[in-house]
Amino acid sequence: MLIFSIWLFTVVASTYLFHKVSGSLSLVKPNMISIIYYYSFLISSYIGGLLIALGIDDYYMIKRMDHEEYRIIGFILLTILMILFPLTQLVVGRLFGFNAQLEYDRYLHEPVRTSVDKNKTVFRLAFLALSGISVLAIAYTFLKTSNLPILELLKGNTSELAKMRIDASRGISGIAVYIRNIFGIALTPILSIIAYVYAAKTKELFWKALFFVLFISSVLISTYDLAKSPIFFYLIMLILAMVYSNNLTLNWKKISGYLIAGIVLLVIMYIAIQGVTQVESFLAYNTGPIGRIILAQIAPFFLHLDTFSHSLPLLEARGLPSFIIGFFDLEQVRSARMVMENVFPENVDKGTGGVLNTIFLGEAFASFGYMGVMAAIVYIATIIQLLYIVLIRLRKTPVVIALFVYFTINIPRTLVGGVSDFYFNPIWVIMTVVLAGLFILEQYFMVIWNFLISKVKKKRVKV
Protein backbone atom coordinates (compact mmCIF):
# COMPACT_ATOMS: atom_id res chain seq x y z
CA MET A 1 0.00 0.00 0.00
CA LEU A 2 2.86 2.39 0.78
CA ILE A 3 4.49 1.78 -2.61
CA PHE A 4 1.23 2.39 -4.45
CA SER A 5 0.59 5.57 -2.43
CA ILE A 6 4.05 6.90 -3.34
CA TRP A 7 3.43 5.99 -6.98
CA LEU A 8 0.05 7.74 -7.07
CA PHE A 9 1.34 10.89 -5.37
CA THR A 10 4.31 10.98 -7.74
CA VAL A 11 2.10 10.63 -10.81
CA VAL A 12 -0.08 13.55 -9.68
CA ALA A 13 2.91 15.78 -8.87
CA SER A 14 4.77 14.80 -12.04
CA THR A 15 1.70 15.45 -14.19
CA TYR A 16 1.40 18.96 -12.74
CA LEU A 17 5.10 19.71 -13.34
CA PHE A 18 5.12 18.33 -16.89
CA HIS A 19 2.03 20.39 -17.70
CA LYS A 20 3.85 23.53 -16.55
CA VAL A 21 6.96 22.88 -18.65
CA SER A 22 5.23 21.60 -21.81
CA GLY A 23 2.38 24.04 -22.23
CA SER A 24 -0.12 21.23 -22.74
CA LEU A 25 -0.51 17.60 -21.76
CA SER A 26 -3.73 17.32 -23.76
CA LEU A 27 -3.67 14.53 -26.36
CA VAL A 28 -5.32 16.90 -28.84
CA LYS A 29 -2.28 19.21 -28.55
CA PRO A 30 0.70 16.81 -28.61
CA ASN A 31 4.23 18.12 -28.22
CA MET A 32 7.74 16.92 -27.44
CA ILE A 33 7.44 17.15 -23.65
CA SER A 34 3.98 15.58 -23.42
CA ILE A 35 5.11 12.60 -25.53
CA ILE A 36 8.15 12.20 -23.28
CA TYR A 37 5.88 12.20 -20.24
CA TYR A 38 3.26 9.78 -21.55
CA TYR A 39 5.42 7.43 -23.63
CA SER A 40 8.96 7.44 -22.21
CA PHE A 41 8.18 7.90 -18.53
CA LEU A 42 4.62 7.01 -17.51
CA ILE A 43 3.62 4.19 -19.88
CA SER A 44 6.99 2.64 -20.78
CA SER A 45 8.64 3.05 -17.38
CA TYR A 46 6.65 4.02 -14.30
CA ILE A 47 3.62 1.73 -14.67
CA GLY A 48 5.85 -1.30 -15.16
CA GLY A 49 8.13 -0.05 -12.39
CA LEU A 50 5.17 -0.15 -9.99
CA LEU A 51 4.30 -3.73 -10.96
CA ILE A 52 7.92 -4.81 -10.48
CA ALA A 53 8.21 -3.03 -7.11
CA LEU A 54 5.02 -4.72 -5.92
CA GLY A 55 6.34 -8.09 -7.11
CA ILE A 56 3.31 -8.78 -9.29
CA ASP A 57 4.95 -8.38 -12.70
CA ASP A 58 5.47 -12.13 -13.34
CA TYR A 59 7.76 -11.09 -16.20
CA TYR A 60 10.34 -13.40 -17.70
CA MET A 61 13.17 -10.83 -17.62
CA ILE A 62 12.69 -9.98 -13.95
CA LYS A 63 12.78 -13.68 -13.12
CA ARG A 64 16.45 -13.58 -14.21
CA MET A 65 17.27 -10.94 -11.56
CA ASP A 66 19.38 -12.37 -8.73
CA HIS A 67 18.88 -9.73 -6.03
CA GLU A 68 15.28 -8.82 -5.17
CA GLU A 69 16.18 -5.56 -3.40
CA TYR A 70 16.65 -3.88 -6.78
CA ARG A 71 12.89 -3.99 -7.27
CA ILE A 72 12.60 -1.24 -4.63
CA ILE A 73 15.84 0.55 -5.51
CA GLY A 74 14.80 0.75 -9.16
CA PHE A 75 11.36 2.05 -8.19
CA ILE A 76 12.91 4.78 -6.01
CA LEU A 77 15.16 5.92 -8.87
CA LEU A 78 12.20 6.04 -11.26
CA THR A 79 10.27 8.08 -8.68
CA ILE A 80 13.14 10.56 -8.50
CA LEU A 81 13.18 10.73 -12.30
CA MET A 82 9.47 11.56 -12.48
CA ILE A 83 9.94 14.58 -10.19
CA LEU A 84 13.49 15.82 -10.79
CA PHE A 85 13.28 15.76 -14.59
CA PRO A 86 10.34 18.20 -15.01
CA LEU A 87 11.53 20.24 -12.03
CA THR A 88 14.85 20.83 -13.80
CA GLN A 89 12.99 21.78 -16.98
CA LEU A 90 10.84 24.24 -15.04
CA VAL A 91 13.94 25.98 -13.65
CA VAL A 92 15.52 26.17 -17.13
CA GLY A 93 12.32 27.60 -18.60
CA ARG A 94 12.13 30.28 -15.93
CA LEU A 95 15.76 31.28 -16.56
CA PHE A 96 14.95 31.92 -20.24
CA GLY A 97 11.61 33.61 -19.64
CA PHE A 98 9.72 30.75 -21.28
CA ASN A 99 5.95 30.69 -20.79
CA ALA A 100 5.18 27.23 -22.12
CA GLN A 101 1.43 27.57 -22.47
CA LEU A 102 1.45 30.94 -24.22
CA GLU A 103 4.35 30.15 -26.53
CA TYR A 104 3.09 26.70 -27.51
CA ASP A 105 -0.41 28.04 -28.26
CA ARG A 106 1.16 30.77 -30.39
CA TYR A 107 3.21 28.18 -32.24
CA LEU A 108 0.18 26.03 -33.05
CA HIS A 109 -1.70 28.98 -34.58
CA GLU A 110 1.27 30.58 -36.34
CA PRO A 111 1.04 30.31 -40.16
CA VAL A 112 3.67 28.32 -42.08
CA ARG A 113 6.13 30.32 -44.18
CA THR A 114 7.19 28.53 -47.35
CA SER A 115 10.34 29.28 -49.33
CA VAL A 116 10.94 32.81 -50.59
CA ASP A 117 10.23 33.11 -54.35
CA LYS A 118 13.82 34.01 -55.21
CA ASN A 119 15.09 30.90 -53.40
CA LYS A 120 12.66 28.36 -54.87
CA THR A 121 14.77 26.98 -57.70
CA VAL A 122 17.93 26.46 -55.66
CA PHE A 123 15.95 24.99 -52.76
CA ARG A 124 14.09 22.55 -55.01
CA LEU A 125 17.28 21.36 -56.67
CA ALA A 126 18.97 20.77 -53.32
CA PHE A 127 15.90 19.00 -51.96
CA LEU A 128 15.60 16.84 -55.06
CA ALA A 129 19.26 15.84 -54.78
CA LEU A 130 18.86 14.86 -51.10
CA SER A 131 15.72 12.90 -51.93
CA GLY A 132 17.56 11.00 -54.65
CA ILE A 133 20.38 10.16 -52.23
CA SER A 134 17.89 8.91 -49.63
CA VAL A 135 16.03 6.66 -52.08
CA LEU A 136 19.32 5.25 -53.38
CA ALA A 137 20.47 4.66 -49.78
CA ILE A 138 17.36 2.57 -49.15
CA ALA A 139 17.93 0.57 -52.32
CA TYR A 140 21.57 0.05 -51.29
CA THR A 141 20.44 -1.15 -47.84
CA PHE A 142 18.16 -3.73 -49.39
CA LEU A 143 20.93 -4.94 -51.70
CA LYS A 144 23.36 -5.33 -48.79
CA THR A 145 20.82 -7.27 -46.69
CA SER A 146 21.14 -10.94 -47.58
CA ASN A 147 17.62 -11.88 -46.49
CA LEU A 148 14.97 -9.18 -46.25
CA PRO A 149 12.68 -10.24 -43.39
CA ILE A 150 9.62 -8.55 -44.88
CA LEU A 151 10.20 -10.30 -48.21
CA GLU A 152 10.67 -13.67 -46.51
CA LEU A 153 7.46 -13.09 -44.53
CA LEU A 154 5.53 -12.41 -47.74
CA LYS A 155 6.99 -15.61 -49.19
CA GLY A 156 5.77 -17.54 -46.17
CA ASN A 157 9.24 -18.33 -44.79
CA THR A 158 8.55 -17.71 -41.10
CA SER A 159 10.71 -20.37 -39.41
CA GLU A 160 13.83 -18.20 -39.08
CA LEU A 161 12.23 -14.75 -38.82
CA ALA A 162 13.69 -13.96 -35.38
CA LYS A 163 17.24 -14.62 -36.57
CA MET A 164 16.68 -12.81 -39.87
CA ARG A 165 15.44 -9.73 -37.99
CA ILE A 166 18.63 -9.66 -35.90
CA ASP A 167 20.77 -10.19 -39.01
CA ALA A 168 18.95 -7.40 -40.85
CA SER A 169 19.58 -4.88 -38.08
CA ARG A 170 23.07 -6.00 -37.00
CA GLY A 171 24.35 -7.90 -40.04
CA ILE A 172 25.28 -4.82 -42.09
CA SER A 173 28.75 -3.49 -41.39
CA GLY A 174 31.21 -0.85 -42.54
CA ILE A 175 30.09 2.14 -44.56
CA ALA A 176 26.76 0.43 -45.33
CA VAL A 177 25.70 1.05 -41.71
CA TYR A 178 26.22 4.80 -42.02
CA ILE A 179 24.48 4.96 -45.40
CA ARG A 180 21.48 3.09 -44.00
CA ASN A 181 21.25 4.91 -40.67
CA ILE A 182 21.90 8.45 -41.91
CA PHE A 183 20.42 8.67 -45.40
CA GLY A 184 17.91 5.82 -45.24
CA ILE A 185 16.45 5.55 -41.75
CA ALA A 186 16.96 9.12 -40.50
CA LEU A 187 16.84 11.44 -43.51
CA THR A 188 14.09 9.88 -45.64
CA PRO A 189 11.22 10.37 -43.14
CA ILE A 190 12.35 13.94 -42.47
CA LEU A 191 12.36 14.77 -46.17
CA SER A 192 8.91 13.22 -46.55
CA ILE A 193 7.63 15.55 -43.81
CA ILE A 194 9.05 18.60 -45.59
CA ALA A 195 7.56 17.45 -48.90
CA TYR A 196 4.19 16.87 -47.21
CA VAL A 197 4.03 20.37 -45.72
CA TYR A 198 4.99 21.96 -49.05
CA ALA A 199 2.46 19.78 -50.91
CA ALA A 200 -0.28 20.74 -48.46
CA LYS A 201 0.51 24.45 -48.60
CA THR A 202 1.38 24.96 -52.29
CA LYS A 203 -0.76 22.19 -53.89
CA GLU A 204 2.00 21.85 -56.51
CA LEU A 205 2.48 18.59 -58.45
CA PHE A 206 6.25 18.70 -57.83
CA TRP A 207 5.81 18.42 -54.06
CA LYS A 208 2.93 15.93 -54.28
CA ALA A 209 5.00 13.58 -56.45
CA LEU A 210 8.05 13.92 -54.18
CA PHE A 211 5.96 13.25 -51.09
CA PHE A 212 4.50 10.11 -52.65
CA VAL A 213 7.97 8.71 -53.47
CA LEU A 214 9.40 9.65 -50.06
CA PHE A 215 6.35 8.31 -48.22
CA ILE A 216 6.65 4.89 -49.89
CA SER A 217 10.40 4.90 -49.23
CA SER A 218 9.87 5.78 -45.56
CA VAL A 219 7.34 2.98 -45.11
CA LEU A 220 9.72 0.48 -46.73
CA ILE A 221 12.74 1.42 -44.58
CA SER A 222 10.53 1.40 -41.47
CA THR A 223 9.22 -2.11 -42.07
CA TYR A 224 11.90 -4.04 -43.98
CA ASP A 225 13.35 -5.68 -40.84
CA LEU A 226 9.87 -6.33 -39.35
CA ALA A 227 10.51 -4.08 -36.35
CA LYS A 228 7.08 -3.02 -35.14
CA SER A 229 7.69 0.40 -33.60
CA PRO A 230 9.33 2.37 -36.48
CA ILE A 231 6.25 2.37 -38.70
CA PHE A 232 4.07 3.58 -35.82
CA PHE A 233 6.51 6.36 -35.00
CA TYR A 234 6.65 7.40 -38.65
CA LEU A 235 2.86 7.61 -38.86
CA ILE A 236 2.84 9.69 -35.67
CA MET A 237 5.42 11.97 -37.31
CA LEU A 238 2.99 12.57 -40.18
CA ILE A 239 0.15 13.33 -37.76
CA LEU A 240 2.35 15.80 -35.86
CA ALA A 241 3.36 17.46 -39.14
CA MET A 242 -0.32 17.89 -39.99
CA VAL A 243 -1.01 19.43 -36.58
CA TYR A 244 2.01 21.76 -36.59
CA SER A 245 1.28 22.94 -40.16
CA ASN A 246 -2.37 23.73 -39.29
CA ASN A 247 -3.71 21.01 -41.63
CA LEU A 248 -5.22 18.88 -38.87
CA THR A 249 -7.09 19.75 -35.70
CA LEU A 250 -7.19 16.79 -33.38
CA ASN A 251 -10.22 15.88 -31.31
CA TRP A 252 -11.16 12.85 -29.25
CA LYS A 253 -13.10 11.27 -32.10
CA LYS A 254 -10.07 11.39 -34.41
CA ILE A 255 -7.70 10.22 -31.68
CA SER A 256 -10.00 7.28 -30.93
CA GLY A 257 -10.02 6.38 -34.62
CA TYR A 258 -6.21 6.53 -34.80
CA LEU A 259 -5.90 4.39 -31.65
CA ILE A 260 -8.28 1.74 -32.99
CA ALA A 261 -6.46 1.66 -36.32
CA GLY A 262 -3.10 1.41 -34.51
CA ILE A 263 -4.30 -1.45 -32.31
CA VAL A 264 -5.64 -3.35 -35.33
CA LEU A 265 -2.34 -2.86 -37.18
CA LEU A 266 -0.36 -3.97 -34.11
CA VAL A 267 -2.45 -7.12 -33.71
CA ILE A 268 -2.00 -7.95 -37.40
CA MET A 269 1.78 -7.49 -37.07
CA TYR A 270 1.95 -9.72 -33.98
CA ILE A 271 -0.03 -12.44 -35.74
CA ALA A 272 1.94 -12.23 -38.99
CA ILE A 273 5.44 -11.72 -37.56
CA GLN A 274 5.42 -13.63 -34.29
CA GLY A 275 2.60 -16.06 -34.89
CA VAL A 276 0.67 -14.96 -31.81
CA THR A 277 -2.92 -16.17 -32.19
CA GLN A 278 -4.11 -16.76 -28.60
CA VAL A 279 -6.46 -14.09 -27.30
CA GLU A 280 -4.96 -14.41 -23.81
CA SER A 281 -1.58 -13.29 -25.15
CA PHE A 282 -3.06 -10.00 -26.36
CA LEU A 283 -4.98 -9.29 -23.15
CA ALA A 284 -2.39 -10.35 -20.55
CA TYR A 285 -0.51 -7.45 -18.95
CA ASN A 286 2.86 -9.26 -18.97
CA THR A 287 2.88 -10.78 -22.47
CA GLY A 288 2.10 -9.73 -26.03
CA PRO A 289 1.72 -6.06 -26.96
CA ILE A 290 0.70 -4.89 -23.48
CA GLY A 291 3.71 -6.53 -21.85
CA ARG A 292 5.90 -5.16 -24.62
CA ILE A 293 4.72 -1.64 -23.84
CA ILE A 294 4.66 -1.49 -20.04
CA LEU A 295 7.31 -4.07 -19.03
CA ALA A 296 9.73 -4.85 -21.87
CA GLN A 297 11.24 -1.35 -21.87
CA ILE A 298 11.66 -0.98 -18.11
CA ALA A 299 12.57 -4.53 -16.99
CA PRO A 300 16.13 -4.20 -18.40
CA PHE A 301 16.63 -1.17 -16.12
CA PHE A 302 16.29 -3.40 -13.07
CA LEU A 303 18.60 -5.93 -14.73
CA HIS A 304 21.13 -3.12 -15.26
CA LEU A 305 21.06 -2.30 -11.55
CA ASP A 306 21.50 -5.95 -10.61
CA THR A 307 24.17 -6.73 -13.22
CA PHE A 308 26.41 -3.71 -12.68
CA SER A 309 26.14 -3.92 -8.89
CA HIS A 310 27.23 -7.53 -8.61
CA SER A 311 28.15 -9.31 -11.87
CA LEU A 312 30.04 -6.67 -13.87
CA PRO A 313 32.14 -3.61 -12.93
CA LEU A 314 30.95 -0.12 -13.82
CA LEU A 315 31.86 0.89 -17.36
CA GLU A 316 32.97 4.40 -16.32
CA ALA A 317 34.47 6.21 -19.33
CA ARG A 318 33.89 3.23 -21.64
CA GLY A 319 30.16 3.98 -21.52
CA LEU A 320 30.66 7.40 -23.13
CA PRO A 321 30.27 7.93 -26.91
CA SER A 322 33.11 6.65 -29.08
CA PHE A 323 33.63 10.18 -30.42
CA ILE A 324 34.65 11.31 -26.92
CA ILE A 325 36.59 8.32 -25.59
CA GLY A 326 38.39 7.82 -28.89
CA PHE A 327 40.74 10.61 -27.82
CA PHE A 328 41.77 8.45 -24.85
CA ASP A 329 42.29 5.31 -26.95
CA LEU A 330 39.28 3.57 -25.41
CA GLU A 331 36.53 1.58 -27.12
CA GLN A 332 32.87 2.27 -26.39
CA VAL A 333 30.86 -0.48 -24.72
CA ARG A 334 27.05 -0.42 -24.71
CA SER A 335 25.59 -1.66 -21.44
CA ALA A 336 22.44 -2.93 -23.16
CA ARG A 337 24.51 -5.49 -25.06
CA MET A 338 26.51 -6.49 -21.98
CA VAL A 339 23.35 -7.09 -19.95
CA MET A 340 21.96 -9.26 -22.75
CA GLU A 341 25.17 -11.30 -22.82
CA ASN A 342 25.16 -11.65 -19.03
CA VAL A 343 21.48 -12.40 -18.46
CA PHE A 344 20.49 -14.21 -21.66
CA PRO A 345 23.70 -15.84 -22.98
CA GLU A 346 21.69 -18.64 -24.61
CA ASN A 347 19.91 -16.13 -26.87
CA VAL A 348 23.21 -14.58 -27.87
CA ASP A 349 24.61 -18.02 -28.74
CA LYS A 350 21.56 -18.75 -30.92
CA GLY A 351 21.92 -15.41 -32.71
CA THR A 352 18.52 -14.14 -31.52
CA GLY A 353 19.79 -11.92 -28.70
CA GLY A 354 20.36 -8.28 -29.58
CA VAL A 355 20.36 -5.61 -26.89
CA LEU A 356 18.30 -4.91 -23.77
CA ASN A 357 17.58 -1.22 -24.21
CA THR A 358 15.83 0.59 -21.40
CA ILE A 359 15.26 4.01 -19.84
CA PHE A 360 18.44 6.11 -20.00
CA LEU A 361 18.96 5.68 -16.24
CA GLY A 362 20.13 2.12 -16.90
CA GLU A 363 23.09 3.12 -19.05
CA ALA A 364 23.84 6.05 -16.73
CA PHE A 365 24.05 3.67 -13.77
CA ALA A 366 26.15 1.18 -15.74
CA SER A 367 28.71 3.92 -16.38
CA PHE A 368 28.92 5.92 -13.15
CA GLY A 369 26.55 4.39 -10.61
CA TYR A 370 23.99 6.39 -8.64
CA MET A 371 25.79 9.71 -9.11
CA GLY A 372 25.69 9.09 -12.85
CA VAL A 373 21.93 8.62 -12.65
CA MET A 374 21.37 11.97 -10.88
CA ALA A 375 23.72 13.85 -13.17
CA ALA A 376 22.10 12.32 -16.27
CA ILE A 377 18.61 13.38 -15.18
CA VAL A 378 19.61 17.03 -14.69
CA TYR A 379 21.76 17.16 -17.84
CA ILE A 380 19.25 15.57 -20.21
CA ALA A 381 16.31 17.55 -18.81
CA THR A 382 18.26 20.76 -19.40
CA ILE A 383 19.23 19.85 -22.97
CA ILE A 384 15.68 18.84 -23.91
CA GLN A 385 14.07 21.96 -22.45
CA LEU A 386 16.55 24.24 -24.22
CA LEU A 387 15.89 22.43 -27.51
CA TYR A 388 12.13 22.71 -26.99
CA ILE A 389 12.38 26.45 -26.38
CA VAL A 390 14.57 27.02 -29.46
CA LEU A 391 12.35 24.99 -31.82
CA ILE A 392 9.18 26.77 -30.68
CA ARG A 393 10.79 30.19 -31.12
CA LEU A 394 12.30 29.55 -34.57
CA ARG A 395 10.54 30.82 -37.71
CA LYS A 396 7.87 28.27 -38.64
CA THR A 397 8.78 26.88 -42.06
CA PRO A 398 8.39 23.35 -43.52
CA VAL A 399 12.05 22.60 -42.75
CA VAL A 400 11.79 23.78 -39.13
CA ILE A 401 8.54 21.83 -38.68
CA ALA A 402 10.32 18.70 -39.94
CA LEU A 403 13.18 19.26 -37.48
CA PHE A 404 10.70 19.81 -34.65
CA VAL A 405 8.77 16.65 -35.57
CA TYR A 406 12.02 14.66 -35.87
CA PHE A 407 13.16 15.53 -32.36
CA THR A 408 9.64 15.27 -30.95
CA ILE A 409 9.62 11.59 -31.93
CA ASN A 410 13.29 10.64 -31.65
CA ILE A 411 14.05 12.13 -28.24
CA PRO A 412 11.33 10.08 -26.48
CA ARG A 413 12.59 6.97 -28.30
CA THR A 414 16.19 7.70 -27.31
CA LEU A 415 15.22 8.24 -23.67
CA VAL A 416 14.28 4.56 -23.54
CA GLY A 417 17.42 3.58 -25.44
CA GLY A 418 20.40 4.95 -23.53
CA VAL A 419 22.20 8.00 -22.21
CA SER A 420 25.33 8.22 -24.38
CA ASP A 421 23.35 9.50 -27.37
CA PHE A 422 22.58 12.64 -25.38
CA TYR A 423 26.28 13.33 -24.89
CA PHE A 424 27.01 13.11 -28.60
CA ASN A 425 24.72 11.77 -31.32
CA PRO A 426 26.32 11.97 -34.77
CA ILE A 427 23.05 11.34 -36.61
CA TRP A 428 21.32 14.16 -34.73
CA VAL A 429 24.22 16.47 -35.53
CA ILE A 430 24.19 15.52 -39.23
CA MET A 431 20.40 15.90 -39.49
CA THR A 432 20.56 19.32 -37.81
CA VAL A 433 23.34 20.49 -40.13
CA VAL A 434 21.51 19.23 -43.24
CA LEU A 435 18.25 20.86 -42.22
CA ALA A 436 20.03 24.07 -41.23
CA GLY A 437 21.45 24.16 -44.75
CA LEU A 438 17.99 23.59 -46.23
CA PHE A 439 16.57 26.29 -43.97
CA ILE A 440 19.13 28.77 -45.29
CA LEU A 441 18.35 27.78 -48.88
CA GLU A 442 14.63 28.02 -48.12
CA GLN A 443 14.65 31.47 -46.51
CA TYR A 444 17.93 33.33 -46.79
CA PHE A 445 19.91 32.05 -49.78
CA MET A 446 19.43 35.10 -51.99
CA VAL A 447 20.12 37.46 -49.08
CA ILE A 448 23.42 35.74 -48.33
CA TRP A 449 24.26 35.42 -52.04
CA ASN A 450 23.64 39.12 -52.73
CA PHE A 451 25.65 40.05 -49.65
CA LEU A 452 28.63 37.99 -50.85
CA ILE A 453 28.37 39.43 -54.38
CA SER A 454 28.31 42.98 -52.99
CA LYS A 455 31.43 42.25 -50.93
CA VAL A 456 33.25 40.95 -54.01
CA LYS A 457 32.24 44.02 -56.04
CA LYS A 458 33.47 46.39 -53.32
CA LYS A 459 36.85 44.66 -53.26
CA ARG A 460 37.14 44.96 -57.04
CA VAL A 461 36.31 48.67 -56.88
CA LYS A 462 39.03 49.23 -54.28
CA VAL A 463 41.57 47.43 -56.42
Image (cartoon, rainbow, N blue to C red):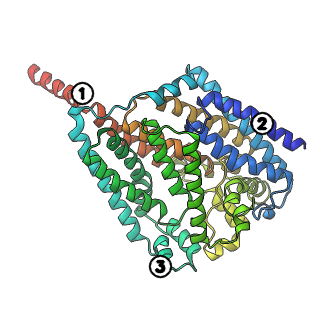
Q: Quadrant of the C terminus?
A: top left
**Most foreground residue, 310 or 419:** 419
Left or right? Give the position of 377 relative to 157: right
Left or right? Give the position of 430 relative to 128: right
Label 1, secondary structure: give it. Answer: helix
Position of residue 7 measured from the top left corner of the image (x, y, whole percent): 80, 41
Label 3, secondary structure: give it. Answer: helix
Going by the numbered disc 3, the residue's amino acid type is Lys
Residue 331 in sight in this render = no
The residue identified by callout 3 is: 155
In space, the residues marked 1 and 3 are separated at their CA atoms by 55 Å
Position of residue 225 measured from the top left corner of the image (x, y, whole percent): 50, 66
Q: Earlier in the sequence, mark 1 or mark 3?
A: 3
Within 10 Å of disc 2 (Cα), the crowding (few <14, some 14-19, many 20+) is: some
Label 2, secondary structure: give it. Answer: helix
Mark 3 against mark 2, which lies toward the viewer? Answer: 3
Position of residue 365 measured from the top left corner of the image (x, y, whole percent): 71, 48
Question: In the figure, 351 relative to 372: above or below?
Answer: below
The residue identified by callout 2 is: 10
Question: In the figure, 375 relative to 193: above or below?
Answer: above
In space, the residues marked 1 and 2 are separated at their CA atoms by 52 Å
Going by the numbered disc 1, the residue's amino acid type is Val
Look at 86% across and 43% down and name the residue there: 3
**Most foreground residue, 34 or 418:** 34
Furthest toward the front, the residue is 253
Place residue 309 in its image quadrant.
Answer: bottom right
Q: Earlier in the sequence, mark 3 or mark 2?
A: 2
The residue identified by callout 1 is: 447
